[in-house]
Image (spheres, grey):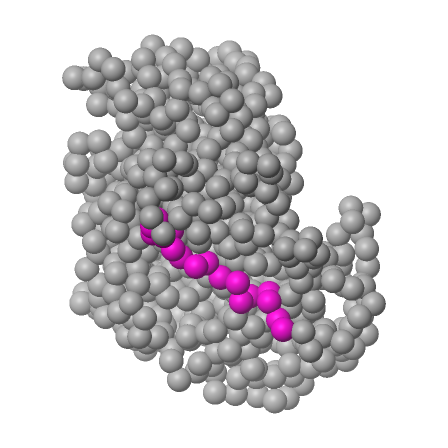
Amino acid sequence: MRPWIGLAAVPLLLLGCASGGDSHKDRRAGQVERFETVSSVDAYNGATPAGAAGPYTVVTGIVHGKLDPTHPDNAGIVDLDKAPREADGQVRYTTDVVILRPKNAAQARRVLFYDVVNRGRKLGQGLFVGGGALATGAAPGADYPSLLRQGYTVVWSGWQGDLAQSGNGAAADLGTAFPTARNADGSAITGLVREEYVPDFAGVPNLPLNYPPASLTDRSEVVFTARQTYYNAAGQQTYDAPAAPVTDWEYVTNANGSVSVRFTAPASVPDAQGGSQPPDAGTIYNFTYRAKDPKVLGIGFAAVRDLVSFLRHDAADAQGHPNPVADLKAAACAAGSNCPANPSGHFDLALGEGLSQSGRFLRDFLYQGFNKDSAGQPVFDGMMALIPAARRTWINARFAQPGRWSKQHEDHFMVGDQFPFAYNVTTDPVSGATDGLLRRCQQSSTCPKIMQLDGSYEWWGGRASLVVTDGAGRDLTLPDNVRYYLVLGTGHGGGAGVTTGVLTQPAAGATCRFANSPVSMGQTQRALVPALEAWVLRNTPPPPSSHPTVAAGTAVAPTAAAMGWPDLSAISVPNGAAATPLALSVPLARHSQLFVTDYRAPAPAVDLARGYAVLVPRVDANGNEVGGLRMPELAVPLATYTGWNVRGAGHAAGESCASSGSALPLAVTAATRAPGDPRAPLSALYAGRADYLAKFGAAADALVAGGYYTALEAGNAKAAAAAVSAALLPAP
């Protein structure tokens, strides 16, 4: 049998280390060879965003980059040495780029805000910029705290190597064109690759493959299995959990040239206890096969490094074309006063932000040493990693799958879930390894100021407690340049706010059993950006970290007893606009377990003797979490809001529902409260709507005072809360 390759090629992690002399000091690891401007047009049809000093311009472009595969700073990019080289020995690639900048330098500030795109999408446009389409939509309004009020330049670029370049990043997703690695003789590189497929999560009828099969006819190395869960009989999550073979399948070549697997599900699949049941929409399928043609996906890290460095420091690209933001060297300095007459760069500081996949990208970008540019300067002075949990990414590896991330049920065993988890450089009490996300930037003196903000789902589904505790469940002291915040009671990314408080529980057959948590978190994410800027620029202390701790008794084991979780097995909740009583039985969800796992082979080797202590927030008498940031909706609750949800019948019932929190309404009155519901009814918490609004407003004001909310957004939240339903709070 040929040796497997699929997961063996992992980063060498030699970034920034010299080798064999100093010849590399006179050459760049990477460079923007040509910045191709596709278009430069007025943003928002020429309208000035509310609060901004002047109008904006949106520049759409394509970055033509080149990398030196022999440079020590690129040594950790897996398979870069196997990418095609041109006559000058360089490796070429291209990415989409979009720049939203003040039209006139006189109306700008020298601050660059880089929003890492998520699966090619500009999520920061909605979260931090506001308004409509960049070129033709409405400008951000007076009711939104847009970054454009501060004269920021906002940048997006492609980095995910398996997303096609569009050439129109302002109106479409941003992608890349990265080279494919080849053997020295020009033949295709092959390796064993594992794909996972859950029908309701994938949303497609066939199992799509990330890489083409090496052969469409040779099935000799294929392993195809189905299971309901990764739990074994002892309640541990392991890849060795019972599974059934899938024997009836075939490759299908799609119209776009990609390949999928069409199959017939087995008649039954095993459960954790060794019994069997029919497969359903939540069944987990794993397909291992020999694939070919891996792209050099680690280029994505270098592409961001080199683009941001170019925008900050270079007057022109390597071919002499002007930098599209070079005139911002004449803009007002970030500090606003005592500006240098001839600044060394176009921006005084650069802030990098990413949400979910993009937050994991930033953690890995830092860990793998890419925050040092070719001149030895920091790429980002400040970083904001939003809802990444304790994970990193699966990017810089042969046959990587950047879109996957470990969860409790789906994609549970995916690269990027292993030590190190914390920013601290520590010795892991479970694996024995010594490492930390800051290790390489400490070696090169390029560490940024860092804020990480997670929601409750990240503690339940992404083991985020490991960012602030060690693997044995002991508190860590965060480094001086790191702040960590947990927004309690939220699903992945938070919700739109409670507003009326009306909730409708899902109908039978839904993937998740309970209504999703509407508790919001975007207000805090936006409030922390100016705090990060001030921290970087003036060393002004930001709002203190806020998260559960072992010492305070608020970070606890994920059991009902340790959490103080109330028994909600027989409750009645107001449902729908009429608040009609609905009987519910609510089990406590399962958290995402973690063991030391070896991913070098397609089938993960899980060491069940070496498990990590994953903690979750403690709850109060009404089931709402304590120990972190309580948004007004949770501090003044109409329901129990959790960071977990449970899969329903027909969807691997009882497993956790990906990315979702839960909203379990409190009874309206003592008379409508079920005898088995230990939580207080709304009538006992609030004298009426006016009392509720007063308490809600006080909670919002407290967040403003702490720096976790802006006054503008507190006003918006209070106005939205005024819509609370009279069906829930009948008294005025």
Q: Nearer the viewer, residue 171 or 518?
A: 171
On screen, residue 120 versus residue 525, left or right, reads right
On screen, residue 502 versus residue 419, left or right, reads right
On screen, residue 489 versus residue 168, left or right, reads left
Residue 243 showing in the rendered view: yes
Where is 448 relative to 99, above or below? Answer: below
On screen, residue 360 versus residue 636, left or right, reads right
Q: Look at the image and give the residue range highlighted in magenta.
A: 3-19
Q: x, y percentage for residue 533?
A: 27, 33
Q: Quadrant of residue 207?
A: bottom right
Residue at horizontal 78%, vertical 46%?
Answer: 256
Q: x, y percentage for residue 171?
A: 60, 28
Residue 139 showing in the rendered view: no
Residue at horizontal 31%, vertical 53%?
Answer: 440
Q: Quadrant of the N terminus?
A: bottom right
Q: Tell whether position 4 is magenta.
A: yes
